[in-house]
Amino acid sequence: MAAATVSSPWFLLSSYRALRPRTTPANLILRLSGRRIRAPVGLTAPHTRLFRHITHAVDEEASARAAAARVDSGAPTIFDKIISKEIPSTVVYEDDKVLAFRDINPQAPVHVLIIPKQRDGLTELGKADHRHEEVLGRLLYAAKVVAEKEGISEGFRVVINNGASACQSVYHLHLHVLGGRLMKWPPG
Ligand code: 5GP
């Protein structure tokens, strides 16, 4: 069996269990007084950061798995509401097939999402079929157009998170176009 990697769910879960707050008198008083315990009492700053990183990663993966479980319901996603303008967004580029708008939680100075206007079964890249070839090309070309418009042609990254273990949270295919800062490798 392959050894657990730092990003594997088992490593994260066992690390979370090892680091979660124990019931010390100090923690008990905080809990009873209804205050949130941010990290185990007595942990030093690097451990505290690691604790937060692990709990965040566990939360992110849990919500990604919950989103994945809802995929086949066919329910509209938040992006359908953005396409219909029911939810406002800052549109950067649009044509008959694709829509590009700023991510609500940007991970870089430029962070734009590009989506097909018709989902047509493309909840994720892994569901792509031959009939999607044209729109897939249009999405990638739109990434280049967006990069030019945003002034990041010299260096930018295009990301597609596919599935729960890649932390995909919205099941309407989308490209992330990121730039405006040094994009390190490997990605997290
Ligand atoms: P994923 O995690 O599925 O690859 O990316 C989904 C992206 O959609 C996330 O980066 C998230 O910030 C973004 N997002 C979620 N809800 C909204 C919204 O209501 N408006 C905008 N503009 N972005 C959103």
Image (spheres, rainbow, N blue to C red):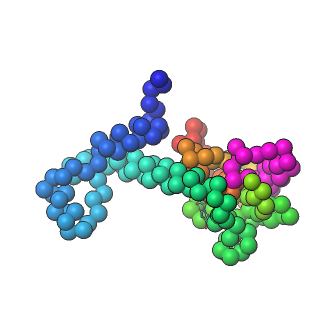
Q: Is residue 116 magenta?
A: no
Q: Main secondary structure of the magenta part?
A: helix
Res. 110 visible in picture: no
Which residue, as the protein is rendered here, is positioned at the far front?
Answer: 73
Comparing 48 with 71, the one in front is 71
Residue 31 at what x, y percent from top left?
22, 62
Residue 98 at what x, y percent from top left?
80, 60
Task: Write the residue at 34% across / 48% down.
Answer: 51
Q: Is residue 44 above or below residue 113?
A: above
Residue 128 at what x, y percent from top left?
76, 46
Residue 67 at what x, y percent from top left?
56, 56
Task: Write the residue at 31% across / 44% down.
Answer: 17
Q: Is residue 62 above or below residue 36?
A: above
Which range of residues does the magenta coloring cover?
A: 122-147
Classify the position of ligand 1 by quadrant: top left, top right, bottom left or bottom right: bottom right
In this rendering, would 177 be left or right of 50? Answer: right
**Residue 77 falls in which quadrant of the image?**
bottom right
Q: Is residue 128 above or below residue 114?
A: above
Q: Is residue 124 magenta?
A: yes
